[in-house]
Amino acid sequence: MNYTEYQKLALRTAAKSADPRLDMAVLALGLVGEAGEVYEAVCDNVPLEKLDAEIGDLFWYAAVLAKACDIGGESEFDAEIVSMLAPRFEESPEDRALDIVYGTTSIAEAVKKQVGHGKPFDKGHMANMLAAIMILARTLTPTSLSEICTKNIAKLKARWPEGFKS
């Protein structure tokens, strides 16, 4: 499963309110919360399966927030972003997980300014930040993106089967 396929399936379980700005704010908060859970999982050296589940939840928020912000999804594979992040790949897993937390706070700040103050955010910057978070998360586990996404969708199907009915 690639990111685009994953995003399409993840969106089937995304709740929507009458106010898209509220949805964006809730998703940004969820993204920060999941980043914290990934950081805790790395620092606590939890079993790989648990870490992968937390990364899958982080991916869910990133994918759904990208759609809510009208950001295309393929940029997480952009070679320029990978090149920019390459020095961070040498950091400890704890430092990379902390970089994810920092990245999500930057995203939350941009959403706050948009939702709370009406200031438009730079979609390119937002897309790059979401991509960077996903790339860094993938360096924390040997599990493939496809496998993490497949397991996350299976979990979502079990929790919200109505979202997957035709």
Image (cartoon, rainbow, N blue to C red):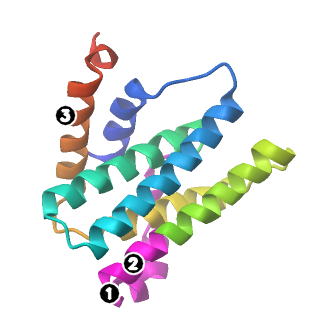
Crowding around mark 1 (Cα neighbors within 10 Å: few <14, some 14 to 19, many 20+) is: few
Check disc 2 and report its element: helix, strand or loop: helix
Looking at the image, is 164 positioned above or below residue 21? above
Q: Are marks 1 and 3 in contact (CB under 8 Å)?
A: no
Task: Tell me which residue sits at (49%, 25%) in the image.
Answer: 15
Question: What type is the residue that disc 3 sits on?
Answer: Ala
Q: Is residue 78 visible?
A: yes
Earlier-in-chain disc, 1 versus 3:
1
Res. 154 mark: 3
Res. 92 mark: 1
Magenta span main SS: helix
The residue identified by callout 2 is: 96
Spatial CA span between label 3 and label 2: 27 Å
Instruction: Assess whether residue 145 is covered by the magenta stretch.
Output: no
Residue at far top of view: 166
Q: Are marks 2 and 1 in contact (CB under 8 Å)?
A: yes
